[in-house]
Image: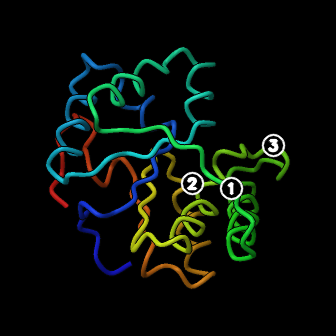
Amino acid sequence: MGNSDLHSDDFVLADTNLFVAVGGPENPKFQKLRKFTARHQITLQVPQRVVEELSTMHVADRVETAIEEGWATKINPPSPTNSDAVAAMDYVRREIARKSGKDEHQVEKADTVFAGLAIEFLRNGHPRVVVLTDDKIAAAAIEGAVEQQGYDESILVLRRSDIMDDGGDVRVI
């Protein structure tokens, strides 16, 4: 995608691993993520199934804090049904399996669904969709999937490392 600057009208889907990677509200990385969303005037859209995944890891309070502070919200996204969305999810599953050495049936559904959701939300009227993840393999697979389906000009995939270095310093994008 040509323009990686975030805009306030971007629909930003956030993966679970982002909240795992930044730690809790007292962690400087969490605080930097909070400042990042405020500076770009964006709200992280966190699918309900992602929040449920976090609760099994006992870190759901991180999302709840972000929601209470107004820089994240829980969404109940539709199951991707558009043929492009389904094809993108299949591509992501195959790529993650290939790059990680896993069997396709062992690839987490949450990792594959972001490509499909991005396409569904784009087709439902959002001018641009951003997927924010901390998973390098999934990010590369999602990028490949949206490019293959012809949506690479409208869907941006960012890794945590694209917006924040390991020390928690926020990058200007």
Looking at the image, tell me whether mark 2 or mark 3 is earlier in sequence order: 3
Of label 1 and label 2, which has the lower sequence position? 1
Q: Residue 137 carries which label?
A: 2
The image position of residue 16, as x and y in percent, is 51, 36
- Between marks 2 and 3, how big is the CA–CA gap? 14 Å
Instruction: Please provide percent x and percent y for residue 48.
Output: 58, 36
Q: Are marks 1 and 2 in contact (CB under 8 Å)?
A: yes
Residue 170 drawn at (x, y percent): 18, 45
For the C terminus, the image quarter is bottom left
Q: Quadrant of the N terminus?
A: bottom left
Kindly identify the amino acid type of the residue bearing the numbered disc 2: Ile
Distance from the alpha carbon under mark 1 to that under mark 2: 6 Å
Count of marks placed on residues: 3
- Indicate the position of residue 92 as horizontal and vertical percent values: 68, 62
Pointer 1 residue = 96
For label 3, the SS is: helix
Query: The residue under label 3 is which amino acid type?
Result: Gln
Q: What residue type is labelled 1?
A: Ile
Q: Is residue 12 above or below residue 91?
A: above
Give the structural element (helix, strand or loop) at label 2.
helix
Disc 1/disc 3 C-alpha distance (Å): 10 Å
Which image quadrant for residue 126? bottom left
Q: Which of marks 1 and 3 is nearer the N terminus?
A: 1
Identified at 17% across, 39% down, the residue is 35
Few, some or many residues within 10 Å of mark 2 (<14, 14–19, 20+): some
Q: Name the residue under label 3.
A: 106
